[in-house]
Image (cartoon, helix red, strand yellow):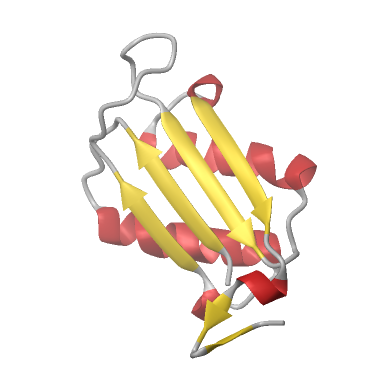
Amino acid sequence: MPFINISTSAKIKDKKKLLDEITIFISSLTNKSKRFVMAKIEDDSEMYFEDESPCCFIEVKSIGSINTSEMTKPICNFIYEKIGIPVDKIYVRFEDVSPSMWGWNGKTFG
């Protein structure tokens, strides 16, 4: 049930590969099964952050398993390595979702 949403002004050449890599990465950061990680990429978006150079906004949502102080740097470094966006052009928003507010397979987790 972790969900990562990546919005970026950069054009990503191999989105399928990046989706697979980010899914594995988020699974390892949250210690949750890759089977339950959902990832979304919106590239080539009209975005502005200080200027028109490439930037990125990332949302990470999960039921527990979010440690913002330990996850922010690795996520930013991952995006820099894979897409080339400098870490000072990346915002990351975390949301720890209550199990009763997350549905899957016709029911909620809590």
Figure quadrant of the C terminus? bottom right
Image position, residue 85 (x, y; %): 42, 28
Indicate left or right for 31 with 39 as reference: right
**Residue at 67% across / 59% down in the picture?**
29
**Location of residue 99 with respect to 44 vertically, above or below:** below
**Residue at 26% across / 34% down in the picture?**
45
Image position, residue 107 (x, y; %): 56, 88
Indicate left or right for 58 with 67 as reference: left
**Location of residue 70 with respect to 108 vertically, above or below:** above
Number of numbered discs visible in the structure rendering: 0
Indicate left or right for 51 with 78 as reference: left
Residue 93: quarter of image: top right
Q: In the orientation shown, which residue stands out farthest toward the bottom?
A: 106
Q: In the orientation shown, which residue stands out farthest toward the top?
A: 51
**Residue at 26% across / 27% down in the picture?**
46
**Residue at 37% across / 60% down in the picture?**
19
**Location of residue 98 with respect to 57 vertically, above or below:** below
